[in-house]
Image (tube, helix red, strand yellow):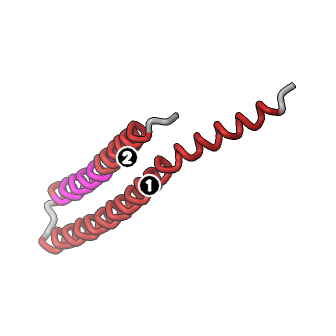
């Protein structure tokens, strides 16, 4: 018989670790992008309009990252919902497997 609480804890731990990894990846890309833009601006000694353009680009990237993180959050929530459903249905599946095994054993020679 499956330990329902233990399974839920493992699933939630896995989901939490996945979220952490995805956030680290997204943050890394964001920081690298900003660093690259800053480096380009410093190297070129960019005039004010280039700085403004870079700022606008950074804003667009920040919004894209925010949208992506929101989508990731929605997927994680959906995954968690499915995980809870699976965890709730696991005991029923175990009971059905036991019943099927008993039925099959009746037909053994």
Q: Determine whether the residue tagged by mark 2 lies in a helix, strand or loop.
A: helix
Residue 89 counted in the magenta span: no
Horizontal relation, residue 96 to residue 54: left or right: right
Q: Depth check: 31 or 99 in front?
A: 99
- Which residues lie in the magenta part? 25-41
Which residue is painted at 32% across and 45% down in the image? 16
**Mark 1 → mark 2, Cα distance in angstroms:** 8 Å
Q: Residue 8 carries which label?
A: none
**Dot 1, how many residues are within 10 Å of its Cα: few (below 14), some (14-19), or many (20+)?**
some
* Residue furthest front as drawn: 106
Which residue is painted at 36% across and 40% down in the image? 9
Horizontal relation, residue 40 to residue 90: left or right: left
Horizontal relation, residue 12 to residue 85: left or right: left
* Residue furthest top as drawn: 109
How many numbered callouts? 2
Q: Are marks 1 and 2 in contact (CB under 8 Å)?
A: yes
Q: Quadrant of the C terminus?
A: top right
* Residue furthest right as drawn: 109
* Residue placed under numbered mark 2 in the picture: 15
Vertical comparison of 61 with 32: above or below? below
Which residue is painted at 42% across and 57% down in the image? 81
Q: Which mark is residue 79?
A: 1
| Disc nearer the start of the sequence (1/2) | 2
Q: Determine whether the residue tagged by mark 1 lies in a helix, strand or loop.
A: helix
Vertical comparison of 101 with 29: above or below? above
**Dot 2, how many residues are within 10 Å of its Cα: few (below 14), some (14-19), or many (20+)?**
some
What secondary structure characterizes most of the magenta part?
Answer: helix
Where's residue 97, x and y in %? 65, 39
Q: Depth check: 91 or 11 in front?
A: 91
Where's residue 83, x and y in %? 45, 50
Residue 30 counted in the magenta span: yes
Q: Depth check: 48 or 15 in front?
A: 15
């Amino acid at each position: 018989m499956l330990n329902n609480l233990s399974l839920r804890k493992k699933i939630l731990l896995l989901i939490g670790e996945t979220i952490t990894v995805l956030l680290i990846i997204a943050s890394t890309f964001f920081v690298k992008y900003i660093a690259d833009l800053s480096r380009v601006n410093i190297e070129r000694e960019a005039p004010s309009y280039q700085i403004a353009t870079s700022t606008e680009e950074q804003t667009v990237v920040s919004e894209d990252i925010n949208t992506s993180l929101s989508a990731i959050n929605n997927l994680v929530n959906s995954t968690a919902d499915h995980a809870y459903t699976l965890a709730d249905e696991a005991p029923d599946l175990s009971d059905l497997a036991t019943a099927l095994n008993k039925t099959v054993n009746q037909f053994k020679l």
